[in-house]
Image (cartoon, rainbow, N blue to C red):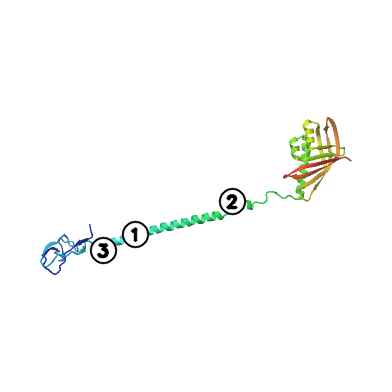
Amino acid sequence: MSIFTTEFDRIPSSGLGAARMKICPTCQQKYADSLQFCLSDGTVLSVFNDPQATLRLETRQTQPPTQVKRGLTVGVLVLAGVGLIGLIFVVGVLILYRTWTNQGAGASNRPSSSSATNTNQPNTIPVLTKDEVAQKLAQVNTEVGLSLVNSDLEALDRLLAEDYRYVSDAGLSLTKQEILTLFRTGNVHYDYLTTSDPKIEVDSDLNKGAVSGRARSKGHFRQQPFTDSYFYKNTYEKRDGRWQLVSGLAWHH
């Protein structure tokens, strides 16, 4: 229903007919014939004929002004609330976007965990002192002697360099492959091999060294038994990260 209706108001007569109106018995307020109750106090209206009045259409509120204002106020508040919620949503989206952007930029600028680990890791190849190299040479020399006594072909193949050669003052000269063949065919066998009075020399570059001393041995060579005492010198080189025997010399008194 519309919030406005028409009310008759009196204007000077200009020859028009009398208008039928209604009047409030309480407040004497006059209304158009279409109304049933007084807009001021709600009293039932009575019919009133006014011959001096003519019809004139005029808009009049059928609802109290306070109710109209109240409706407008509520509408404004609702619109303001909706606008505030929309503003909060937009601000939240902007904050999230900036956060994601900053996180992405920070992740791209941070060094990867692998690069940071590699930077902080020390050199994996330890630098040995001269004394430590000498101890390593003594250990390798002992391993060579045990491999000869045990006829360990795998260990001998690993410990002897490809260009290894053994030379004795008796005129015997053997290469690595000849020595491996002698052990493989059983033409050489040691019952024991001992060393004493070792002397270890280490070159300044720490990649070469020699072990010399006195040796005693007993065994069989080409089906002939032998017992020997002699001096020896084994020369070593570090190749591909490991120590190998490159030459062996043996001589008697």
- SS type, badge 2: helix
Q: For the point 73% across and 36% down, which residue is it?
A: 154
Residue 197 shows up from this direction: no
The amino acid sitting under disc 3 is Thr
Looking at the image, residue 43 sits to the left or right of residue 85; the answer is left
- SS at circle 1: helix
Which circle marks residue 179 in the picture? none
- The residue depicted at 60 percent of the width and 50 percent of the height is 114
Q: Nearer the viewer, mark 3 or mark 2?
A: 2
SS at badge 3: helix
Residue closest to the far top: 223
Q: Earlier in the sequence, mark 1 or mark 2?
A: 1
Per the model, the C-alpha gap separating discs 1 and 2 is: 52 Å
Q: Position of residue 186 (x, y in %)?
A: 79, 31
Q: Amino acid at mark 2?
A: Ser
163 lies above or below 127: above
Q: Position of residue 193 (x, y in %)?
A: 81, 37
Query: Which residue is tagged 3?
Result: 66
Q: Is residue 105 visible?
A: yes
Residue type highlighted by circle 1: Leu
Disc 3 from disc 2: Cα separation: 71 Å
Question: Which residue matches tag 1?
Answer: 79
**Residue located beneath label 2 in the image:** 113
